[in-house]
């Protein structure tokens, strides 16, 4: 008999009955419970914290519970599946029991939310069972979709919903007369059911009466209505498909977007292809001709795309947004209402967007810092301006609750929703069918209001978790075994450039054979850091002749400080480097617009003194070269520039060139090389801004190596 049991018997004044060698003792003490352990003493808001604890009782541990910040006690899960031993371990994840909202899908007259525990809740109109419960009246607050416990993504159409599950299959429910549930039938049902034969799915999208999925092989399959060829099949031969149909000609697809009558895919490298109705130019190929076969949009670097009813919007990896198609109600966001645009137009003032979502006649973007901006049709308040209007032609900032940032955004028929970093959802716009989900009547909301019934994750600050245990005779510990932890606000600040993006002609690189468009080798250099989640990616882009920026390189190296590339030898050129941190925040740094030029040694601006000889050969820039072999010869020119570089020939017999900038010696360059190297950049120099400067090359040579070549001078204004 242990001393603990003896003490228990004495303290309780229990009778001890002895018969032979057996002793009957009644346990009056609760289990021993030390302070619990936590997976982290400090974490970011939204990061789950695991609590684990051990309880000991000679008579057996029956249950363990925890309380967070004094809240009601919640059961811990047994480490071995059941509490029945003398020493037991239990654990739980402190994430508000998984009720944190991860993403939202907005349908025509309803809304669904994916929760952290992989379940789905929906609210709003339910005429066809699209809320996952029996068809009938609208639901003004969220209801749980029956049978979905492993969802990883959701997509909503006019009156149907599909969920991507953890096993890469898809399950759909709601209106199915046009085959939009993908089950091979044309029936409507409120119970989720699988799309037969479809596995390996990486992304899904839905709108109207159509659904599309991206397969693991980078292809796309669609099902539903095909009146305009928007499931990729000739509408003359097939009006609808109730099973997944392959979209021919699409490979390397990384993202998908579905509109009311057309669809678009993002392909490898950020390219875009669209198909379906095109009466307003919503396919973006420069025409208004509908096409069931995908057509290519002249745009690149896209990371998010969303078709609406008759317009399409996309976001690039650098944060800019573009739209095309119908625009009389401001759908294109360009600052003016226009009938249609068959090619992409820039959305006014958007430079840090991370995703876009388009509704029937409006669109919204989530910005890198967690803000939300919307534009377009606004009669129901779906743009979130605080007023109702016929249309907003330029993005309007949506007033989110102070101190909270958006983690995602979704645009529906005539309403919009945002998922905030506290794990809650806010919606605004049409509420005729309770699609806002605030349980407060059916009036439209022109500013964000909270959807009820889904608490978010723990707030920033200090928290305390306590544990208690009970034994087999219902003795319960006092619950004073406690441990504290702290949560810090999420990272919403972008990286900081301590050295802005700049361009330098690359010393040691060789020019190609010179023509009017000879590429000049350059290095784009920068220095950036991020004190929060750290820099994850650098995006390097180039703009030529004042055109849009195009991606040159995507660098997944936080320590990168430069990238070697080229720029043309004439015209206008600029580079932009965007630093993206681990939380998706963007910070761009753009060089000044540069005007490069190649000044050949034969130009009249180059004034030579002393003895120089001219050599004609195709191996020289421009086909000719001058060299001096007598010490003291000079070649001088006056330039207006922000950077210059000397192009020369290196090889046997070459010696030193002394280079003066504004009559000050700046470099002694050795041109010797065992084998000849033509058109090589041997020196470069730059200034903070463009201005007038004098560059002089002085032939110094060296014993046995007297020759100095002057091939060309790269001038960057």
Image (cartoon, grey):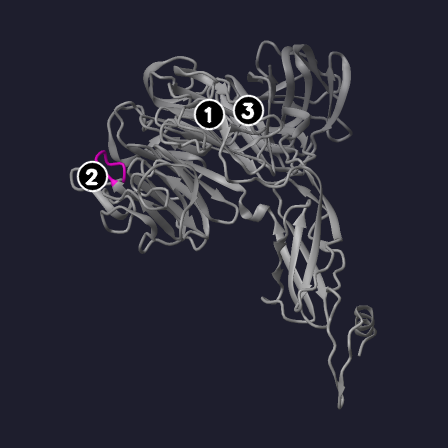
Is 99 left, or right, of 561 in this rendering? Answer: left
Q: Secondary structure at mark 3?
A: helix
Does residue 646 lie above or below 215 as drawn? above
Residue drawn at (45%, 52%) of the image: 149
- Identity of the residue furthest to the left in this view: 236
Asked whether the beta carbons under mark 1 and mark 2 sit within 8 Å of each other, the answer is no
Residue holding disc 2:
234
Relative image position of residue 653 (x, y in whole percent): 69, 31
Image quadrant of residue 443? Answer: top left
User: Is residue 229 shown in magenta?
Assistant: yes
Residue drawn at (37%, 54%) of the image: 199
Residue holding disc 1:
321
Range shown magenta: 225-231
Does residue 401 lie above or below 673 as drawn? above
* Distance from Cα at disc 3 to Cα at disc 1: 41 Å
Image quadrant of residue 15? Answer: bottom right
Residue holding disc 3:
621
């Amino acid at each position: 008999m242990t001393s603990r049991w003896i003490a228990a018997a004495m303290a309780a004044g229990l009778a001890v009955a002895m018969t032979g060698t057996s002793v009957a003792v009644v346990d009056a003490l609760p289990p021993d419970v030390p302070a619990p352990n936590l997976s982290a003493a400090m974490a970011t808001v939204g990061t789950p914290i695991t609590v684990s604890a051990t309880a000991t009782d000679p008579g057996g541990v029956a249950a363990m519970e925890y309380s967070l910040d004094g809240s009601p006690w919640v059961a811990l899960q047994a480490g071995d599946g059941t509490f029945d031993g003398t020493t037991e371990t239990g654990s739980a994840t402190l994430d508000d029991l998984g009720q944190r909202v991860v993403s939202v899908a907005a349908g025509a007259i309803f809304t669904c939310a994916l929760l952290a525990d992989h379940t789905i809740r929906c609210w709003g109109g339910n005429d066809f069972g699209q809320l996952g419960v029996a068809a009938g009246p609208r639901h003004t607050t969220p209801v749980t979709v029956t049978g979905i416990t492993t969802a990883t993504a959701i997509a909503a159409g006019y009156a149907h919903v599909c969920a991507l599950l953890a096993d890469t299959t898809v399950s759909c429910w709601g209106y199915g007369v046009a085959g939009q549930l993908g089950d091979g039938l044309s029936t409507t049902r409120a119970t989720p059911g699988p799309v037969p034969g479809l596995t390996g799915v990486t992304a899904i999208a839905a709108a109207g009466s159509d659904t599309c999925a991206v397969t693991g092989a980078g292809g796309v399959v669609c099902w539903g209505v095909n009146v305009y060829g928007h499931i990729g099949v000739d509408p003359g031969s097939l009006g609808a498909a109730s099973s997944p149909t392959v979209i021919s000609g699409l490979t390397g697809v990384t993202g998908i977007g579905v509109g009311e009558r057309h669809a678009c895919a993002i392909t490898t490298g950020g390219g875009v292809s669209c198909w379906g109705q095109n009466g307003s130019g919503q396919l973006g190929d420069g025409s208004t001709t509908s096409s069931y076969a995908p057509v290519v949009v002249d745009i690149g670097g896209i990371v998010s795309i969303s078709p609406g009813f008759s317009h399409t919007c996309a976001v690039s990896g650098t944060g800019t947004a573009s739209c095309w198609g119908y625009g009389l109600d401001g759908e294109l966001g360009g600052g003016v209402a226009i009938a249609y645009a068959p090619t992409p137009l820039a959305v006014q003032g958007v430079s840090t967007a991370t995703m876009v979502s388009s509704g029937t006649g409006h669109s919204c973007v989530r910005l890198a810092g967690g803000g939300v901006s919307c534009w377009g049709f606004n009669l129901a308040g779906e743009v979130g301006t605080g007023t109702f209007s016929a249309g907003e032609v330029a993005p309007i900032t949506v007033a989110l609750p102070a101190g909270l940032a958006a983690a995602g955004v979704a645009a529906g028929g005539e309403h919009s929703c945002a998922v905030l970093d506290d794990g809650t959802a806010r919606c605004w716009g049409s509420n005729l069918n309770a699609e806002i989900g605030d349980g407060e009547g059916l009036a439209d909301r022109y500013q964000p209001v909270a959807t009820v019934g889904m608490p978010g994750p723990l707030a920033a600050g200090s928290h305390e978790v306590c544990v208690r245990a009970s034994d087999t005779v219902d003795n319960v510990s006092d619950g004073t075994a406690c441990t504290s932890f702290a949560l810090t606000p999420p990272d919403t600040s972008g990286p900081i450039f301590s050295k802005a993006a700049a361009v330098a002609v690359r010393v040691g690189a060789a020019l190609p054979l010179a023509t009017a468009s000879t590429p000049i080798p350059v290095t784009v250099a920068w220095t950036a850091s991020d004190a929060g989640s750290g820099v994850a990616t650098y995006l390097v882009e180039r703009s030529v002749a004042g055109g849009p920026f195009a991606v040159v390189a995507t660098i997944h190296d936080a320590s990168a400080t430069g990238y070697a590339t080229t720029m043309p030898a004439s015209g206008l050129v600029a580079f932009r480097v965007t630093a993206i941190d681990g939380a998706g925040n963007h910070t761009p740094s753009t060089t000044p617009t540069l005007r490069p030029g190649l000044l050949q040694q034969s130009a009249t601006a180059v004034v030579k003194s002393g003895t120089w000889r001219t050599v004609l050969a195709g191996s020289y820039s421009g086909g000719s070269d001058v060299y001096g072999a007598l010490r003291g010869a000079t070649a001088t020119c006056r330039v207006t520039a922000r950077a210059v570089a000397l192009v020369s020939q290196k090889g046997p017999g070459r010696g030193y060139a002394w280079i003066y900038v504004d009559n000050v010696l700046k470099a002694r360059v050795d041109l010797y090389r065992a084998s000849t190297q033509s058109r090589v950049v041997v020196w470069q120099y730059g200034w903070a801004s463009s201005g007038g400067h004098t560059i002089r090359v002085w032939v110094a040579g060296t014993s046995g190596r007297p020759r100095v070549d002057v091939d060309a001078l790269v001038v960057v204004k």
